[in-house]
Image (spheres, helix red, strand yellow):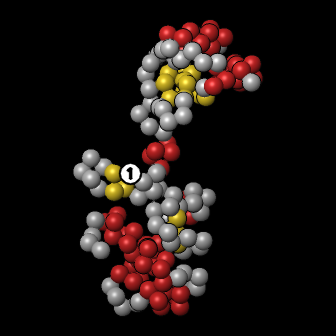
Amino acid sequence: MALRTFAWLRGDKSLQMIRKSLDTLRELDLLEHPSTYKLVKLGESIGVHREGDQAIDIAKHPGQSTVGTLADVFAEFETIKKRRVDDLLRPRVGVEVNPRRLGGWPTIAGTRVPFDLVAELVSDGTVAPEQVNQYYPGVSADAARDALDYQRSITGAAS
């Protein structure tokens, strides 16, 4: 497995960089067998990622670690001002983002209906969430409420 990992790294990393990475593992007291680590390509460098840890650069900038990953950016998180930021791909149960659907614009889950059209339809109260399926078949009342809640979270309006 270790040899296969080195062959994979060697696809676009120099042998000198791979050797330096192994030396850095020893310097950082990461002395287990290389197969116990997840080696990752960090752009022009090589990193090591251990379960529950951040990736640590072991080639170009030994010891520097990642601040976060795209998975962290896509997931729900809280800002410094304690404002909740929704999960990017699944902001609400009834609202989803599919990069291959409508250019990644949020839609009602399982449909091609843009969330904002549904939210606008129910926002002033003239159309009840239970009536939305008359305008957009396949859109449930719960999904309409989720769309409105999501729109309010984006604009900062009170629920």
Q: Nearer the viewer, residue 65 or 1?
A: 1
Residue at the (57%, 56%) spot, across then down: 99
Q: Describe residue 155's horizontal placement relative to residue 115 as left or right.
A: left
Residue 51 lies, in percent from the top left, at 54, 34
Name the element at disc 1. Answer: strand
Amino acid, disc 1: Phe
In the displayed structure, would residue 155 be above or below residue 60?
below
Quadrant for the N terminus, please. top right
Residue at the (59%, 73%) spot, across then down: 111
Residue 103, visible in the rendered structure: no
Residue 106, visible in the rendered structure: yes
Residue 49 lies, in percent from the top left, at 54, 29
- The crowding category of the residue bearing disc 1, from other C-alpha atoms within 10 Å (few below 14, some 14 to 19, many at least 20), is some
Residue at the (66%, 11%) spot, across then down: 15
In the displayed structure, would residue 106 be above or below residue 28?
below
In the displayed structure, would residue 10 be above or below residue 23?
below
Q: Residue furthest front?
A: 32
Residue at the (47%, 32%) spot, across then down: 54
Residue 120 lies, in percent from the top left, at 39, 79
Residue 150 lies, in percent from the top left, at 39, 68
Q: Describe residue 150's horizontal placement relative to residue 21 as left or right.
A: left
Count of marks overlaid on the render: 1
Q: Describe residue 98's horizontal placement relative to residue 83 as left or right.
A: right
Q: Nearer the viewer, residue 119 or 159?
A: 159
Question: What residue does disc 1 label?
Answer: 77
Quarter where residue 43 is shown:
top right
Quadrant for the C terminus, please. bottom left
In the displayed structure, would residue 15 be above or below residue 129?
above
